[in-house]
Amino acid sequence: MKDLTKMKESLVNYVEELDEDNSIKLAKEVLNEGIDPIYLLDLMNEGMKRVGKLYDCKDYYIADLIMAGLIFRQVLELEEMTDFFRGTYDKKTGKIVMGTVKGDIHDIGKDIFRYMLEAYGFDVIDLGVDVSREIFLKNVEKHNPDILALSGVLTSTVDEMKEVVNSLKEAHLRDRVKVIIGANHLTHDALKFIGADAFATDASVGAKLCREWMNAENGQGVKGNV
């Protein structure tokens, strides 16, 4: 019997070190050992968070963030992972419109969030980066999503997030869609100021919350703000 605990620790370290080959190889091994694919996502996300901290400390560069995202995507595309999520979420979980708000061109965190949502069976409409409130509003009207997800790495994006929510209110669309905001700098005070339903500083937490919302919509859970 292999030491699964050591394998888990090594996997997180490999992701942190941007070791593509060993990350993929070990991900396959832990899956063969019977690890829950959802737990594997959490391990990958922990590695991604470490990469993000190294970037914040200027030890890593944007190319390193991109590399980490590619590793994450390749693990999600492993046959064992796609088979699991296809079998678990054979029907679409829900629909999400998402994007990085105007004034911010960061997309790594947004992309990781999207990967996880897609694995959970969500239909995701990704509007990209530097998205204006008008474009968000237009796409909420067009696609009628269950959830609108706003991303923004820069602290200055708090004001823009608030304007997007205000635009939904002015168009009488706010009551038709849940709004989740995502960034490391967000707090409960920022959530209250913006007027969103929830915030997440972690892609895994945010994706799970979106699933909980959809379960609640289907009578399987309790709705509530975070």
Image (cartoon, grey):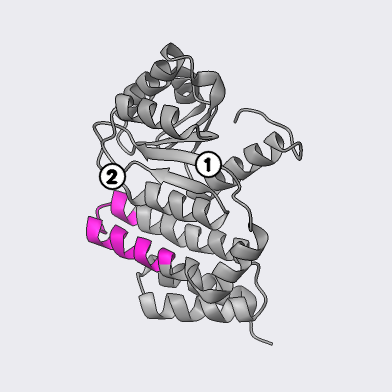
Quarter of the image containing the C terminus? Answer: top right
Q: In the rendered image, which residue does mark 2 sit on?
A: 106
Q: In the rendered image, which residue does mark 1 sit on?
A: 95
- Give the residue displayed 36% in from the left and 61% down from the top: 69
Amino acid at the residue labelled 2: His
Location of residue 66 in the rendering, given as x and y in whole percent from the top left corner: 29, 60
* Vertical placement of residue 35 versus 61, above or below: below
Location of residue 199 in the rendering, given as x and y in whole percent from the top left corner: 50, 33
Task: Kindly report the secondary structure that dominates the magenta region of the rendered protein.
Answer: helix
Horizontal placement of 11 versus 156: left or right?
Answer: right
- Give the residue displayed 43% in from the left and 19% down from the top: 168
The answer to whether residue 153 is magenta is: no
Closer to us: 144 or 42:
144
- Residue 184 visible here: no
The residue sitting at the bottom extreme is 1
Q: Quadrant of residue 130?
A: top left
Give the residues drawn in magenta, as a range. Answer: 54-73
